């Protein structure tokens, strides 16, 4: 019984609209992130790198300890580096993704606001009178005619 209740509760949770919407958002966000990363890496960063002297940001690093190599040229111990260029690249990716999402949300907000303003500007039609009101109106009109 406990197992069935657990599965039943999980099914109710998983089928809620918000959970499904969130899952779709995460999947779309992941795909959008890849597109923006490609835009940053392939379109935006090469010109910036060219402007700063042909530097690829991902290659920027501070060597804290040089690599140790053997006499035959094999690396015995890898160099210890602080890869700040990769950090800069990821920061640019984040800023562009955040800005893109901000723009999309702002556009959606403006469209929603316009629809709400149009709905508020158009006066609502008065509701149709009920059957009782119609009957009472007829009775009133008949009584006025008799006077």
Image (spheres, rainbow, N blue to C red):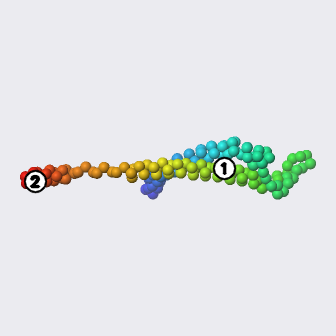
- Please give the count of numbered marks on the rendered protein: 2
Q: Is residue 96 left or right of residue 143?
A: right
Q: Residues within 10 Å of mark 1 (few under 14, many from 20)?
A: many
Quarter location, residue 1: bottom left
| Viewer-closest of 5 and 88 | 88
Which element carries disc 2, helix, strand or loop? helix
Q: Residue at x 7, y 52 (%)?
A: 146
- Can you tell which of label 1 and label 2 is closer to the viewer? 2
Query: Could you tell me which quadrant the C terminus lies in?
Result: bottom left
> Which residue of the protein is positioned furthest toward the right in this rendering?
71
> Which residue of the protein is positioned furthest toward the front in this rendering?
147
Percent x, y of residue 2: 45, 57
Q: Residue at x 18, y 50 (%)?
A: 134
Q: Residue at x 72, y 53 (%)?
A: 88
Percent x, y of residue 119: 39, 50
Question: Marks 2 and 1: in contact by CB < 8 Å?
Answer: no
Residue 93's label in the rendered image is 1
Percent x, y of residue 44: 69, 45
Residue 146's label in the rendered image is none
| Viewer-closest of 80 and 29 | 29
| Viewer-closest of 7 and 1 | 7
The residue at which mark 2 appears reads as 143
* Residue 14 visible to an observer of this rendering: no
Q: Earlier in the sequence, mark 1 or mark 2?
A: 1
| Viewer-closest of 77 and 59 | 59
* Alpha carbon distance from label 1 to label 2: 79 Å
């Amino acid at each position: 019984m406990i197992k069935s209740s657990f599965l039943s509760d999980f099914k109710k949770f998983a089928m809620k609209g918000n959970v499904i919407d969130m899952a779709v958002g995460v999947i779309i966000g992941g795909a959008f992130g890849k597109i923006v990363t490609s835009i940053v890496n392939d379109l935006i960063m090469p010109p910036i790198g060219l402007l700063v002297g042909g530097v690829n940001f991902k290659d920027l690093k501070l060597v804290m300890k040089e690599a140790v190599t053997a006499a035959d040229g094999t690396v015995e111990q890898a160099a210890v580096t602080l890869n700040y260029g990769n950090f800069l690249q990821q920061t640019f990716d984040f800023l562009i993704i955040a800005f893109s999402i901000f723009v999309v949300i702002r556009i959606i907000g403006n469209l929603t606001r316009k629809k709400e303003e149009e709905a508020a500007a158009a006066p609502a039609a008065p509701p149709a009178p009920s059957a009782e009101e119609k009957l009472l109106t007829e009775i009133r009109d008949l009584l006025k005619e008799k006077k």
